[in-house]
Every structure is written in structure tokens, then in C-alpha cells.
């Protein structure tokens, strides 16, 4: 019961932060939304900031657990990376506003909480980085700066919360395929290489689409 | 004189927004910083939100003008795109906190102002997109979804404001080179192609470094 009420409070806070923004939402608004007096609400939460931290922290933990379970699959690392990109993009598409709270409001946290979120973000980045390194070891990827490659992929996927339109031209799956094609295959035509392979142009794209 | 005072106000606001955050900065703080009474300050600005809009708008206009001038250079489009990536990354590195205000506080704007910023952001993305299309027409890039490729590049570069460390392992120029290597060359080893080119491995990386 106690847990359930806490969950109700968290859910109401997410809805209000999305609708009105974090700064414009008062503790009174949250209390009203769950039918509690402000004094009683403080039985469940310490502060509005603590609530924001819990919401952001639980969002990123969900992303980490999802990525860990993809990384543990018995598949080539490059296929796991492609699956990770698709899962990330689908998750952002499914809850773009919630993701925007995570991206946009981390600045509103106190330094210590902000630090914990930054650490969790780094953990997520390192998991991607390890997949890239594994794919290099497996011979699928050429040696690259895996840390920079992971940050490039992460940034591309995260930025999507700014432009994604559910009514847009591409589905989340198609966006993931387009991104993977760029990251895996690169933009260059590589005419020297292609010229030596008549009839085997790379125009169709080297992708992991299946 | 009038313009100069306005510029002082804008500059003071940028400093305060960076140091304390937009929401925690009051109009009184800004007035104090430029040695004006609050009432006199309203001679120069309409509201704190209007100030935020002007700061974000002028930031993005600077980015657009820089990109336009790079796009107009008499060089192959792929070289112009590489230059654009490097210029963007250097600009974010030079003013990471100011860029974070642009990224993080756009949500605080009124819908109409937010719309104008989104339009300017789109304009920037379209300039990148056009460079990718040009590079395809010139034969340097293979046909790709240029809109998605532009958004991937933009996201990777923008996300840098979250992890860039001036004391870090790589300089802005090196970060740009690593990103360009991933975006241009791709992560895949492409063993079938490489196998047909003995002694001509792609391990050294297809980059635009010069």
C-alpha cells in the first residue's frame, strides 16, 4: 500500500512535469493530483527535486537494464549493437516527453544527484563502447576510437527526442535502420574499392537489416 | 549607447543563466549585474523569457551563418561537411555552457518563440542535409537517407555538450576527426571487399584528415 501510493505520486509527478514543465509544477500540484494534503505528501517524498531525481534515475536504470540484456544475447556483437540502437530509438519514440525530462531537467538537480545521473549515463555509454570493441575483436568492425564511436551513436539516438514525430515519414524501426546504415556502412562511396569490384556496388547499403 | 546597454544586459543574462540556471535567475539579479533598477531594466527588455529567446536565437543564428559560409566554399561537398563538423564541435567546445542553455532551456520558451527556434534548428539541419546530398551527387557519398544522416551527425555533435571535458583525452579537432571517421568510413570492416584487395586494408581508416 505504501509502495503503491509512492508509485502514484511518481506517476502524477511525471505527468505534471511533462505537461507543465518541472519548474512550473508545485508540490501542491502533485498533492492535488493524488488527492493528498501537501503535509501528507511529504510522508512519501522529501522534495520536488528528490522526485525529479527518482524519475530520471529510474528512466536511466530502465535503459541500462535493457541494454545489459541485449548485450548478454548469444549473437555477434555487431548484431547486438544494431539491436541496442533499435531498442534505444524505440524507447525514445515511445516516451519522447519523459525522455525530454531526463535530458532537459538533469541540470535542475543538486550536484550530488546530478553526479549519480552522469555516472549512470557513463555506464550506458561504456556498455555501447564495449559492444563496439567486441565487434572489432570479432573482426566485424575495423579498429576505431570505440569511446568516440559510442558517444556519436548515443548522441544521434538521444537527439531524436528533439525531432521525432510519430506522424513522420519513418517509423522508429526505419529510423534505427537508417542510423545503423550510416554508422555501420559510412557515407563514403569509396570509389577506389568499388571500382575494383565491378557489378558489386555498395549502393544497396551494408546494413544489419534482416 | 542604447545598443551597448542592451548588449551589456544580454551578456549579464548569459553569465547568470550559466552560473545559476535560467529559472533560478531573477530579473532583479540581472538588473543588479548591470547596475540598473529593475524598472529601468524593463526599458531594455520585455521579460526574462524574451531575454532567453534573444540569447538562444542569436546563438543559433551564429551557428547558421558559420555553416552557410562553410557551405559556400569552393571545395568538394564532403570536405565542406567535414569542415562543418569540425567547426560545430569547436564552437560547442568553446562555449559548452552557453550551448547547454540553448539545448536545455528552449523548453522554457513560449510556444511561438519555441517554434521560431525549432525552425532555425531545422534550417541548420537542412544545410547539413544539402551538403550530404551534394556529396552524393559529386559521387563521393553513396546514396543514403540524407535527412537521417544529417540528424545523426547533428545529434552526435550536439550531445557533446554533455560529455566534453577541456582536460579530456582528445582536443575538439581530434573529436571531430574521430566522428568524421565513423560517419564517413563507417564501423564495418567489410571483409569481403577487403579480402579482394590484398595489401590494401582499410585499417588506417578512410578519413578526411589532411
Image (cartoon, coloured by chain):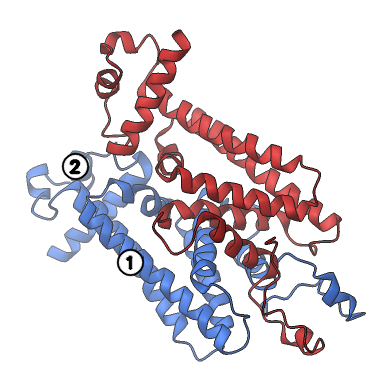
Chain colours: A blue, B red
- Relative depth, front residue between B123 and B34: B34
Q: Is residue A168 above or below residue B30?
A: below
Q: Which residue is mark 2?
A: A27
- Relative depth, front residue between B201 and B115: B201
Give percent across and percent down for residue B74: 81, 44
Q: Quadrant of the C terminus of chain A?
A: bottom right
Q: Secondary structure at mark 1?
A: helix
Residue B91, disc: none
**Residue at 50% across, 29% down:** B113
Q: Is residue B3 above or below residue B187?
A: above
In the shown orientation, is residue B32 left or right of residue B54? Answer: left
**Residue at 73% across, 76% down:** A206
Counting other residues with Cα less than 10 Å from the Cα at mark 1, is it few (<14), some (14-19), or many (20 or more)?
some
Q: Is residue B43 above or below residue A128?
A: above
Counting other residues with Cα less than 10 Å from the Cα at mark 2, is it few (<14), some (14-19), or many (20 or more)?
some
Answer with the quarter of the image where residue A209 lies: bottom right
Residue A120, disc: 1
- Relative depth, front residue between B4 and A119: B4
In the shown orientation, is residue A94 left or right of residue A117? Answer: right
- Distance in Å between CA atoms under marks 2 and 1: 27 Å
In the shown orientation, is residue A4 left or right of residue B197? Answer: left
Answer with the quarter of the image where residue B180 lies: bottom right
In the shown orientation, is residue A3 left or right of residue B85? Answer: left
Q: Residue furthest front?
A: B210
Q: Earlier in the sequence, mark 2 or mark 1?
A: 2
Give percent across and percent down for residue B102: 46, 39
**Residue at 80% across, 65% down:** B142
Mark toward the viewer: 2 or 1: 1
Amino acid at each position: 500500500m505504501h509502495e503503491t501510493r509512492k508509485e502514484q505520486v511518481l506517476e502524477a509527478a511525471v505527468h505534471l512535469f511533462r505537461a507543465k514543465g518541472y519548474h512550473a509544477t508545485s508540490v501542491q500540484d502533485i498533492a492535488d493530483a493524488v488527492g493528498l494534503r501537501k503535509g501528507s505528501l511529504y510522508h512519501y517524498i522529501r522534495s520536488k527535486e528528490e522526485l525529479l531525481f527518482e524519475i530520471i534515475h529510474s528512466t536511466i536504470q530502465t535503459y541500462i537494464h535493457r541494454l545489459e540484456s541485449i548485450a548478454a544475447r548469444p549473437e555477434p556483437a555487431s548484431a547486438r549493437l544494431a539491436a541496442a540502437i533499435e531498442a534505444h530509438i524505440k524507447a525514445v519514440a515511445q516516451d519522447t516527453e519523459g525522455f525530454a525530462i531526463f535530458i532537459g531537467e538533469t541540470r535542475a538537480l543538486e550536484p550530488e544527484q546530478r553526479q549519480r545521473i552522469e555516472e549512470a549515463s557513463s555506464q550506458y555509454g561504456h556498455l555501447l563502447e564495449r559492444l563496439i570493441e567486441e565487434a572489432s575483436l570479432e573482426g566485424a568492425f575495423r579498429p576505431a576510437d570505440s569511446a568516440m564511436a559510442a558517444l556519436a551513436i548515443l548522441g544521434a539516438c538521444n537527439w531524436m527526442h528533439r525531432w521525432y514525430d510519430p506522424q513522420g515519414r519513418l517509423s522508429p524501426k526505419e529510423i534505427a535502420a537508417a542510423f545503423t546504415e550510416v554508422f555501420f556502412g559510412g557515407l563514403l562511396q569509396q570509389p577506389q574499392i568499388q571500382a575494383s569490384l565491378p557489378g558489386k556496388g555498395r549502393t544497396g547499403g551494408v546494413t544489419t537489416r534482416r
